[in-house]
């Protein structure tokens, strides 16, 4: 095969030689960075924030925040005080180690302080994306039996407090009116709280963060990560993000998704980096301005973003001074070679694709600055990670053969539980010794991995994982919908869009108006990004004899492909 290669960038970097490092690396060396190497007791936030107070980083800016109306900076020392205060707010409410505390609000300094403070007292933080509507919020709070939630007045109506017996405390950020009885003002509570906090020292295997993510069946799964993940957050921050002392680092992901916490909070702060957080809506123009104004040097975003930037045209880029950029990264979905070429043309930067999942907690496969990039490839395994392509029985396949992308179990940031669902957890480890990702891929003869697709029906729209089952369940709640089947349809900008095939109940007729109404119903009931962009009405949907909608057949219809084996289909 004649595959294009973009040569390695010129150093110096934190990782100078991939092959040598891969051969000699041992995770246990990384632990020595941290004080708990000696004490045995640990807290992520101590390592990410407080530890720096004894160094030159004490008054270094940790967070540069802006949105349409605010423009603020916070040093490591200030974040230490603020997170201590929030820790005390929680402790005063009786919240303790292991309790689940959710944060449900737009990106703001208060969100970051809440996450840090929660972890400091040993509680488990559950970040929720602000776009979630009531049903999505309920599922997650119910499953985790969260005891407290931090939110804003605008989002309060979406929290069905009376249906959630475990939820005792609602903390409201930015309340302008008198709060309802039982609700707590974040600002008032913070004002009264002390900056002195006895950090909760936990074991490295104690729970720290719970991220809900979608599978192809069932409700969203609560993926639990533990403090031990910091080993990998730290080291990937060095070798993949290439964080150095003077960098200004911007990860555009929202903390509602794993990239927004692992690489939007933990990894950069463990490395003592200055991060940029931008609140508010996304436009290419606004984002270019953020890079220019803050002199962003490392920028971590997603293919869907880059494709939107591409769509906005090269002329727009030229209006901004983006010369501060020295390293660009992408995650979440396949990074098309065209996008890599565009990055070279407009920023003179290689975009470094990397692969991982909510469940893996941190990056596992990546392109490194010291290594040639093959556009379209996700790169090579991180030192300490053994990745392979295996068949369904666990045999490793030779180069260029497509199969299951799997990882030898036991890396530091691997999830430790699916909350309340041990059977689901076991499904990932059905082949002994391996974590089976659910992605298919192949490895070429030089060891580069190439993503091919999902093995299950999970949809990836604009980098967000959406479970078709969740959308279908919402759709059938609509009075007009008898049955619904949901698939991902390829889309040039979003990767995939959500398409729903719907059969209507008797008495309803297909119409544009009904389509809009159904779309709105999902938007308001579940989340805007989960609403089907396309709806097609059908008299009947293809089903198995046991009554399961055959999404595979829907997809084949959509793409004009052969429908394959239909022996299990009814009629
Ligand atoms: C971090 C994150 C995980 C799924 C994963 C895969 C897809 C992620 C990718 C990629 C192609 C890449 N994915 N990175 N596909 N190339 N570089 O995205 O986590 O939201 O859990 O999604 O995303 O299908 O299995 P998560």
Image (tube, helix red, strand yellow):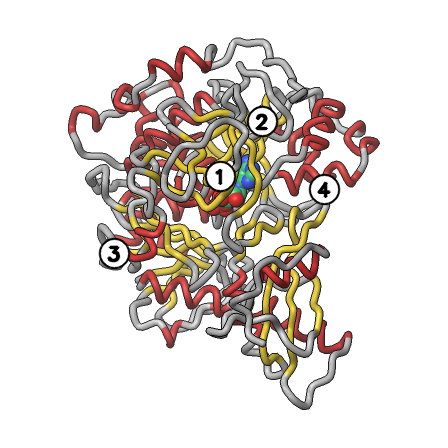
Dot in front, 2 or 3:
2
Q: Nearer the viewer, residue 252 or 380?
A: 380
Asked if disc 3 and disc 1 are in contact, CB closer than 8 Å, the reply is: no
Quick check: 189 above or below 341? Answer: below
Circle 4 is placed at which residue position?
308
Disc 4/disc 1 C-alpha distance (Å): 31 Å
**Sequence-first tag of 4 and 2:** 4
Q: Residue at x 26, y 59 (%)?
A: 93
Q: CA distance from mark 3 to mark 1?
A: 46 Å
**Quarter assignment of residue 37:** top left
Label 1: how many residues lie within 10 Å, few (<14), some (14-19) or many (20+)? many
Q: Which mark is residue 352?
A: 2
Asked if residue 166 shows in the view, the reply is yes
Q: Along the line of sight, which residue is nearer the eye, 495 or 40? A: 495
- Tell me how far mark 2 sits from mark 3, CA to CA: 41 Å
- Which mark identifies residue 403? 1
Quarter of the image with the N terminus in it: top right
Which residue is under mark 3? 95
Q: Which comes sooner in the sequence, label 3 or label 1?
A: 3
Marks 4, 2: nearer the viewer: 2
Q: Which one is closest to the eye, mark 4 or mark 3?
A: 4
Identify the mark nearer the N-term, 2 or 1: 2
Nearer the observer: mark 3 or 1; the answer is 1
Location of the C terminus by quadrant is bottom right
Secondary element type, mark 1: strand
Question: Label 3's element?
Answer: loop
Q: How many angstroms separate mark 4 from mark 2 (CA)?
A: 17 Å
Other-residue count near label 3 (Cα within 10 Å), few / some / many at <14 / 14–19 / ≥20: many
The reply to whether dot 4 and dot 1 touch (C-beta < 8 Å) is no
């Amino acid at each position: 095969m004649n595959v294009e290669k973009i040569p390695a960038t010129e150093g110096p970097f934190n990782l100078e030689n991939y092959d040598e490092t891969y051969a000699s690396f041992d995770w246990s060396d990384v632990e020595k960075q941290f004080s708990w190497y000696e004490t045995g007791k640990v807290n992520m936030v101590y390592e990410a924030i407080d530890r720096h107070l004894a160094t030159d980083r004490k008054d270094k800016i940790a967070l540069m925040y802006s949105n349409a109306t605010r423009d603020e900076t916070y040093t490591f020392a200030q974040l230490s005080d603020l997170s201590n205060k929030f820790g005390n707010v929680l402790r005063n409410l009786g919240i303790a180690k292991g309790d689940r505390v959710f944060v449900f609000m737009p990106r703001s300094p208060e969100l970051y302080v809440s996450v840090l403070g929660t972890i400091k007292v040993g509680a488990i933080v559950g970040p929720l994306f602000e776009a979630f509507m009531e049903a999505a919020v309920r599922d997650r709070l119910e499953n985790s039996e969260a005891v407290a939630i931090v939110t804003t007045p605008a989002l309060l109506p979406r929290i069905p407090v009376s249906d959630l017996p475990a939820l005792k405390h609602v903390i409201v950020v930015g309340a302008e009116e008198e709060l309802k009885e039982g609700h707590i003002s974040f600002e008032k509570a913070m004002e009264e709280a002390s900056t002195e906090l006895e950090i909760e020292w936990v074991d490295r295997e104690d729970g720290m963060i719970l991220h809900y993510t979608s599978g192809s069946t069932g409700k969203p799964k609560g993926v639990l990560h533990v403090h031990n993940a910091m080993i990998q957050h730290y080291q990937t921050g060095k070798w993949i993000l290439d964080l150095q002392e003077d960098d200004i680092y911007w990860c555009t992901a929202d903390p509602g998704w794993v990239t927004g916490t692992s690489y939007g909070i933990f990894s950069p702060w463990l490395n003592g980096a200055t991060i940029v957080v931008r609140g508010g809506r996304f436009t290419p123009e606004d984002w270019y301005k953020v890079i220019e104004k803050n002199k962003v040097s490392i920028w971590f975003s997603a293919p869907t973003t880059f494709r939107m930037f591409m769509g906005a045209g090269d002329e727009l880029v030229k209006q901004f001074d983006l010369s501060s950029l020295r390293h660009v990264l992408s995650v979440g979905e396949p990074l098309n070679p065209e996008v890599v070429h565009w990055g070279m043309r407009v920023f003179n930067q290689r975009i470094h694709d990397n692969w991982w999942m909510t469940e893996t907690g941190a990056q596992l496969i990546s392109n490194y600055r010291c290594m040639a990039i093959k556009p379209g490839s996700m790169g090579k395994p991180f030192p300490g990670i053994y990745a392979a392509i295996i068949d369904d029985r666990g045999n490793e396949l030779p180069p260029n053969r497509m199969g299951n992308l799997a990882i030898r179990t036991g890396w530091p940031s691997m999830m430790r539980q699916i909350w309340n669902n041990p059977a689901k957890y076991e499904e990932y480890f059905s082949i002994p010794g391996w974590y089976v990702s659910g992605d298919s891929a192949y490895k070429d003869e030089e060891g580069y991995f190439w993503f091919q697709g999902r093995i299950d029906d999970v949809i990836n729209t604009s980098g967000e994982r959406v479970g078709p089952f969740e959308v279908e369940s919402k759709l059938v709640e609509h009075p007009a919908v008898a049955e619904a089947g949901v698939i991902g349809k390829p889309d040039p900008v979003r990767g995939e869009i959500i398409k729903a095939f719907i059969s209507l109940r008797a008495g309803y007729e297909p119409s544009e108006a009904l389509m809009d109404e159904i779309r709105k119903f999902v938007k308001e009931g579940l989340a805007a990004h989960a609403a089907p962009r396309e709806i097609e009405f059908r008299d009947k949907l293809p089903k198995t004899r046991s009554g399961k909608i055959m999404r595979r057949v829907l997809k084949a219809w959509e793409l004009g492909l052969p429908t394959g084996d239909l022996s299990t289909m009814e009629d």
